[in-house]
Structures are given as C-alpha cells and as structure tokens.
Amino acid sequence: MSRLCILRLSACFLSIFTLGGDWLAAADRPNILWITSEDNGPELGCYGDSYAVSPHIDELAQQGLRYKYCWSNAPVCAPARTTIISGMYPQSLGAEHMRSQLPMPAGLQMYPYYLRQQGYYCTNNSKEDYNLDKPEGTWDVSGNKAHWKNRAPDQPFFAIFNHTISHESQLRKRPHTPVHDPAGVKLPAYHPDTPQSRQDWAQYYDKLTEMDTLVGQNIAELKAAGLYEETIIFYYGDHGSGMPRHKRWPYNSGLHVPLIVRFPDKYKHLAPPDYQAGGTSDRLVSFVDLAPTLLSLCGIKPPAQWQGHAFAGPHASEPQKFIFGFRGRMDERIDMVRSVRNERFVYLRHFYQHRPYGQYLHYMFQTPTTRVWYQLHREGKLTPAQDAFWREKPIEELYDLQNDPEEIHNLASDPAYEETLHQMQDVLGKWCLRIGDLGVLPEAEVHRRSQGKSPYDLLKAGTLVSNYNQLIAAAFLATRISLDEVDHQGVVDALQNTEAGVRYWACLFALRHQQAGVAEYREELLQRLEDDSPSVRVMAAEALGKYGTPADLKRILPVLVSAADLEQSDLYTAIAAWNALDELDDKAASVRDKLAELPESWDGVPQKLKSYIPRLKEKTLADLDGKPLP
C-alpha cells in the first residue's frame, strides 16, 4: 500500500475517532426542521376533528407518519420545554414547576450542543422558557431572527419555528369575530354550555387555522429553497389546549398532542420500522423522547443519563409500554400530580388532595370560560361532571380512554378495574423511584439544600437526601393511607424524623384528615411550629390554623406572616405561606393589615417569578376585604 493511501486511511480513522464514533457521512446527515405550536392538542382534521380547518398540517400528515399517542409530559409550557431541551424528566432535576430556575447537571448539555459538535447549524425561533440555566454555546442563534437560511454553504441544519398564535392568551382576546360558528362547538361534558365557553372554543379553533397557515409557510419556504426532500420535518403542539382542565392538568386532555413526522425518500432508512406515508403509529411516545430521537437521526448516541427513548434512527430503542405526566407548582399555586397511560387507560395520583382542582390561579382566571364556570359553581348551577373541577380531588383517578375519552367516569374504586388500577399504581411508583422524582421534597427545601448546585447531582451523590427511599415512601403513604389504617406511633415517629421531607408529609397527613387528624397529632404539630425547616413550619401551621383550636390559630398566624415576609424568608417558602394564608379565609382577618404591609418582591427574585407573590397577596386581601376576584 502506498504511503499516500496510508495517510488517507489514517486521516479517515482519526476523523471518526475525534467524533467519538458518532459519525455519519455528509450525505447521511439530514436537515431537521421542527415546527411547533403552542397550547393545542390534536384538534386537527388529520386527527379526525371535523370542526377543525387545518389543511397544511393535514397535508403533512398525508405525506408523513401521524403518532396516535404522544404526550407532552407536562401540561404547561416551561416544564414541557425543559423536558425536551434536557432529554430528562424535570422532576429529576428539581425543575418541574411553572416556572423555576436551576442548574444543569454536571457533564450534561442541552441537546443542540451535541448537534453543533457534529457541525450542525442550530437555530431556535424563538421561545425558550427553560427551567434550567442555559449553558453557553447551546444555540448558534436563538431569537426572532433565527433561521436555517443563515447557515454556511452546504452546512446541515436543525431549526425550530415556534408559533404562538394558538396560545391561551390568544383564544380569550376580545373583541373577536368568530370564523368557526360557536353553535357548532362540541363542548366537553365538564364545561358548562355558556356563550363564553362557546366563544372561547370557537376562537381556539380560529387560532388553530391561523397557526396552520404559518405551518404551511414554513414548509413552502423549505420547498422554495429546494430543501424539502433534504429535510426531516416534525410538527407537534407543546401541550393540550389553553382551555381550563386541559392546560395545566396531566389528564390525557392536557398532555395529548399532535405529532407528525415526514421523512423524505432519501432518509427513509432513518425512519422507524412502522413508517408509512399517510400512516399512523401506535407507539407510545412523549417529549422526553424527542431529544434522544433527534440525536439518533444525526447518528449521535444519546447520553446515558438521558431518560427518554429514541423512536427513530440507528439508536432507536424498543417501544415503551407506558408514558408519564406530571404537574408541579403552577405559577403561584402549589400542587403535585403524577399520571401514566398506556394505549387504553390513564391513571392520576394526587399528592395534594386537600387542594381543589380549580385553585384560584390568576392567569387561568383571565379566560372567560374559567370565570363563568366558577360563578356557576358558586350558584349551584352545574352538573356533577362540571362541578367536580371546583371540589376536593380524589387520591386516585382511572379512566378508560377507549370508552370515556373525556375522562369523566373515575374507575379507581370500581372492582372490575382493580387489576388495572394496581398495575398503574405499581408502574407509577416504580417510575418515580427510578427517575429520582424530587417533587417529594418541598420546593423550598430543594433550593435551600442545593445552594445553586444541581439537585440531580446532589441526589445522585447522596447529599441532597440522606434516605430517598424513605422520603418517597412517606409521600406515597401520607397521601393515601387513612386515619383508621395508620400506625399511630409511626406517624408520631415521622413527625419527629431527622429528614425534614418526612416530617413535611407527616404534617400533610394530619391536614388531610382535617379535625380528626389535627386533634390526633396536635402536640406534635405544635412542636413543628419551631421546626428548623421553613416548609415543615408552614405545613404544620396550615394544619393547625384550619382545624385546630382558637389558641392554635393565635400561635400559627405569626408563623405564617413571618414565612410570607420576603425580608425574613425565601421566595418558595413565601409562596407556600401565602397559599396557606389564603386557605385560612376569614381566620386570617386579624393579621390583614400586617399582610398588606408585607413586601411583594426583593432583588433576589428571578424576573419570571416576580408576579407570584403580588398575585397571592392581591387575592388573599381581596377575600379578606370581601372584594371580587382580581
């Protein structure tokens, strides 16, 4: 062999070695275009909705593969986008809430970084909204001027175009003359039949049509550049519709999104096995799978720490039997829900059963449907299916999506579905344990312990929680077991446990059981008012304030006022304290003037969280003053 041939071979092997083995020839590196839209589920013609007008997306579906079961994992934008950009469940990162800000785990990057390392030009036009600090070098360009056309000649690209015209804020804008006839709206059984509900739904469909036009423009631009047959196209919505009980709720209605993927002939060898133009896929996929799939299509092996499963490309994995959803704090309101589905059933597990579904959330209450729905509840004019949203939640919900797609008939207590219920319970519990779900640790504790470091890293190192298995068991048991079933001494021991998270869930157990629970553990709860964990103090104070004695009320009010004071407290403890004060209603009347004097912000509050304390304060004071909802 000549010296020249040896040098060429050496250069080739060196090139492959430098890329860590994740290499595709230039001809095999596809362009990839992601077209996304905000706040819309599968209310599209190609998904069988005859009321919808979506010709461009329908045409894409005729040329590509339509996924029947795709979940966004989170039913609201920031945690959903955090799932996509990280390839991990945000609960593992402490970043499940709407909104928050935490560091990336050490040694991991957001997915565009790995593409850029392989020579891809990566652009995002334009929304980010991540709950994680974005490492430098993530995007080539991110903003409203980002575009694939600005890449170097012959450089492969990955580009996102995100359309906001279907966002929740747009479906409630007035004045608006509906194009879709409000009389033709098919209202879900849980929404009251009012002019406001019909207008909001019709306007939502109008906005979907406008969004569809923008999708058509993205595709037309690609065709005009001669790149349509060189580019793999994804279209998906970022979570369910902006209507109440869709957005923010990890039902199928809040998580089910359209996903359509088109592979040009040139790249069909990268398509999944069930790919067929105009076909459908029964594979269960979710947003945590998007980043691994993207890297796989570009010949890159996804990082081992990622929790999703690629569904196309050379690194595709076997189909999964279940997909998972979650709900954490929604803006200013605290909650924790986990859900799981297979092809037929969806199961939800509530950890804050004592909070109603329809907590007063300022942003949600700006939608006319929400306000009239709540008013009709107060007037006693709703059907049981409609009224449930304003009532206390059950611990568990189980729905047969095949026979009950609107998720109305809860089968969790039906003996005929006991086996299915137990299967879903087992799958969900093992998933929470496997991913290291940090929702079981109060948000304020996560921040207090991590001190600017990645909670994921600290949990893996064993320094965030000394006994995670004990903590997650406490969360599941405290929010499920009844007062009659419980080991009394076990609850006392939990209230005195060395782990603050266990003490927190033991306090919540007493709160769940109202007067009986608080009376049973009153002395231990009073001790917890001086706990070294602010989260435990607040939970004990709420329990005693709602269901304790008048003397208890006098003791707990200063605790909650202090915890709500941003000059003495941290943001996340203050959010919890204001939530507790709002729950006390008139019992907080004696501290009304003190609450009015509390600061609404301080320099350390992240910009995107600045509105939460003012909203809580406004609502609490309005209730105490007998004023209408803000």
Image: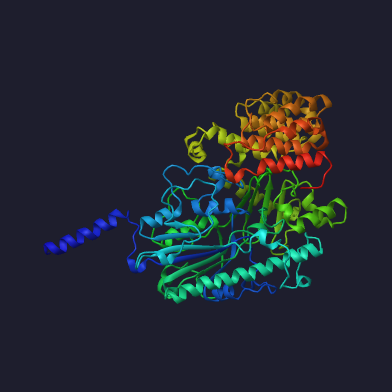
Would residue 316 be visible to someone looking at this image? Answer: no
Quarter where residue 344 is shown = bottom right
User: What residue sits 57% from the left and 74% below the top?
Assistant: 56
- Front residue of 400/140: it is 140
Quarter where residue 158 is shown = bottom left
User: What residue sits 82% from the left and 44% below the top?
Assistant: 627
Please, is residue 598 above or below residue 350 in the view? above
Colour scheme shown: rainbow
**Residue sticking out furthest to the left:** 2
Q: Position of residue 240 (x, y in %)?
A: 64, 60
Quarter where residue 329 is shown = top right
- Front residue of 342/441: it is 441
Please, is residue 629 above or below residue 315 in the view? above
Residue 448 shown left or right of residue 19 in the figure: right
Please give the count of numbered marks on the rendered protein. 0
Q: Position of residue 45 (x, y in %)?
A: 64, 73
Please, is residue 553 above or below residue 45 in the view? above
The N terminus lies in quadrant: bottom left
Residue 286 shown left or right of residue 227 in the figure: right
Would residue 405 be visible to someone looking at this image? Answer: yes
Q: Position of residue 141 (x, y in %)?
A: 44, 57
User: What residue sits 73% from the left and 36% below the top?
Assistant: 580
Q: Where is residue 128 in the image (x, y as percent from the top left)?
A: 53, 54
Please, is residue 353 above or below residue 310 in the view? above
